[in-house]
Amino acid sequence: MMKSKLNIVFVLFLTFTLGFAQTKQEREFRIDKEYFPTQSLELLLPYIKEVKKVRHYKETDGQKISYEAKFKKDKLRYSVEFDSLGNLEDVEFIIKKNDIPSGSFINLQNYLKNKHKKVKVKKIQQQYLAVGTESKKVLKEAFQNLLLPSIRYEIVISSKEEKGYQYYEVTFDHQGNHLSSRKFSDSNYDHVLY
């Protein structure tokens, strides 16, 4: 009897933690420039010399810490993310759906229609990853807005579900093929939009 109760508790615990692990639980805090990694600031400086307002953030998801610089340049809203050691992770900027090549847009739109009942697109970002690539090269390509095979599109959506609306961050490759999807709690909604 006791063994079966323990098994039930264990199964419930696993169900809760697995469901929770799939939900993006990031927290973002604005910080002063002096708390931002020096190496990151030096790498970014040539690209933000004429930018008036640069906001610095520290972000954590409970396991990982990263730093993010957000600013507006040439009418685009940029977000440049670095790991806790100051190494570049990615560069993103907000775009509109008509900025995505039509074939890619059709693919990602079909995916969203097939996976979700009712979808509202909240934000689209063009993303340049720095994994395995020289940071200076990634920054140069991102600030030139080059449409390369390595770019990704990160889309924040709200999806109508049985219990209301759920927010997702959905990532696609340059051809509009689905790469990943993550739920996130609506308490993170504001920082995800910029």
Image (cartoon, rainbow, N blue to C red):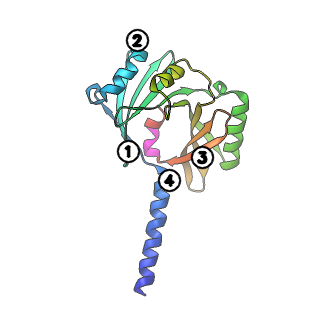
Q: Quadrant of residue 46?
A: top left
The residue located at (53%, 27%) in the rendering is 94
Graded by Cα atoms within 10 Å as few (under 14), some (14 to 19) or many (20 or more), the crowding at tag 2 reads few
Identified by mark 4, the residue type is Gln
Residue type for callout 3: Ser
What is the x, y in percent for residue 100?
65, 28
Q: Quadrant of the N terminus?
A: bottom left
The residues colored magenta run 186-190
Q: Looking at the picture, tell me which residue is in the foreground, 25 or 37.
A: 37
Real-space Cα separation, disc 4 to disc 2, in angstroms:
39 Å
Q: Looking at the picture, how far across and down is residue 102, in whole percent?
A: 72, 28
Amino acid type, label 2: Glu
Image point (41%, 44%), residue name:
26
Q: Earlier in the sequence, mark 4 or mark 1?
A: 4
Q: CA distance from mark 1 to mark 2?
A: 31 Å
> Which of marks 3 and 4 precedes in the sequence?
4
Mark positioned earlier in the residue sequence (1 or 2)? 2
- Badge 3: residue crowd in 10 Å (few <14, some 14–19, many ≥20): some
Quickly name the residue at label 2: 50
Which label's residue is closer to the chain start, 2 or 3? 2
Q: Main secondary structure of the magenta part?
A: helix
Q: CA distance from mark 3 to mark 1?
A: 27 Å
- Residue 114 shown in magenta: no
Residues tagged 3 and 1 counted as in contact (Cβ below 8 A): no
Which residue corresponds to mark 4? Answer: 22
According to the picture, the residue beneath numbered tag 3 turns out to be 159
Provide the secondary structure element on which disc 3 rests.
strand
> Which of the two marks, 4 or 3, is nearer to us in this view?
4
Q: Position of residue 23 (x, y in %)?
A: 48, 51
Task: Return the residue at label 1.
Answer: 64
